[in-house]
């Protein structure tokens, strides 16, 4: 899934990518209104859980309430990390951090951390990272030329994850993720 807003000129601004098992829609807790739209990037199954039902369950199951607090805390941390990355990170750092985020999120879900498919386009990645399509494509090509990645259209293999980590090493963060975590 991707979440996005519409700019004044009608363009989409991607604000998040969500993997299976991740939670989206937390932005509506405050006032019942979502600040963004969501669109499936591939065949997707969604489980809708109304907030009042989740609130009732959380009141009766303390461990669920604790997990919700953790999830909201991670959401706040993510927003701060993203602001820092977009405000101060170079294009190289942004793309490297994005790839590390996907790697870690896939790993946490029991999938390969170094061999995965991107369901989003380079244009959507650029929108999310505040970069031009050409910049994203150029960096994917450069990372491949330097032996960091092997890319075949949407299939990505990370060949040198330590090099990616080195590129973002000076960024302050708790963990390299750029989307709404579920754990």
Image (cartoon, rainbow, N blue to C red):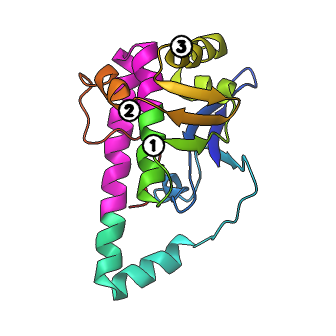
Q: Nearer the viewer, mark 1 or mark 3?
A: 3
Is residue 113 positioned above or below 95 on the image?
A: below
Q: Secondary structure at mark 1?
A: helix
Give the quadrant of residue 182. bottom left
Q: Earlier in the sequence, mark 2 or mark 1?
A: 1
Name the foreground residue: 104 vs 70. Answer: 104
Give the quadrant of residue 162. top left
* Dot 3 alpha-carbon crowd within 10 angstroms: few under 14, some 14 to 19, many 20 or more: few
State the residue at coordinates (44%, 16%).
92
Q: CA distance from mark 3 to mark 2?
A: 15 Å
* Dot 2 alpha-carbon crowd within 10 angstroms: few under 14, some 14 to 19, many 20 or more: some
Total numbered labels placed on residues in the image: 3
Q: Secondary structure at mark 2?
A: helix
Name the foreground residue: 71 vs 165. Answer: 165
* Dot 1 alpha-carbon crowd within 10 angstroms: few under 14, some 14 to 19, many 20 or more: many
> Are dots 2 and 1 in contact, CB under 8 Å?
yes
Residue 162 — which label?
none
Residue 161 — which label?
2
Residue 60 pos. (x, y %) = 35, 88
Residue 47 magenta-drawn? Answer: no
State the residue at coordinates (56%, 49%).
18
Residue 103 — which label?
1
Q: Secondary structure at mark 3?
A: helix
Name the foreground residue: 77 vs 32. Answer: 77
Q: Write down the region rendered in magenta.
A: 70-98
Mark 3, residue position: 145
State the residue at coordinates (70%, 65%).
45
Q: Main secondary structure of the magenta part?
A: helix
């Amino acid at each position: 899934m991707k979440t996005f807003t519409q700019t004044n000129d009608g363009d989409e601004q991607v604000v998040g990518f969500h993997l299976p098992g991740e939670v989206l829609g937390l932005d509506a807790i405050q006032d019942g209104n979502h600040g963004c739209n969501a669109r499936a990037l591939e065949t997707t199954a969604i489980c809708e859980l109304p907030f009042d039902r989740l609130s009732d369950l959380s009141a009766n199951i303390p461990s669920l309430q604790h997990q919700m607090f953790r999830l909201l805390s991670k959401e706040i941390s993510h927003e701060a990390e993203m602001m820092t990355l977009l405000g101060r990170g170079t294009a190289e750092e942004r793309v490297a951090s994005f790839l590390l985020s996907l790697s870690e999120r896939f790993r946490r879900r029991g999938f390969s951390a170094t061999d995965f498919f991107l369901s989003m386009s380079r244009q959507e990645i650029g929108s999310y990272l505040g970069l031009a399509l050409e910049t994203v494509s150029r960096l994917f090509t450069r990372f491949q030329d330097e032996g960091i990645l092997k890319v075949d259209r949407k299939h990505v293999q990370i060949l040198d994850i330590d090099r990616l980590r080195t590129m973002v090493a000076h960024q302050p963060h708790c963990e390299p993720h750029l989307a709404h975590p579920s754990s």
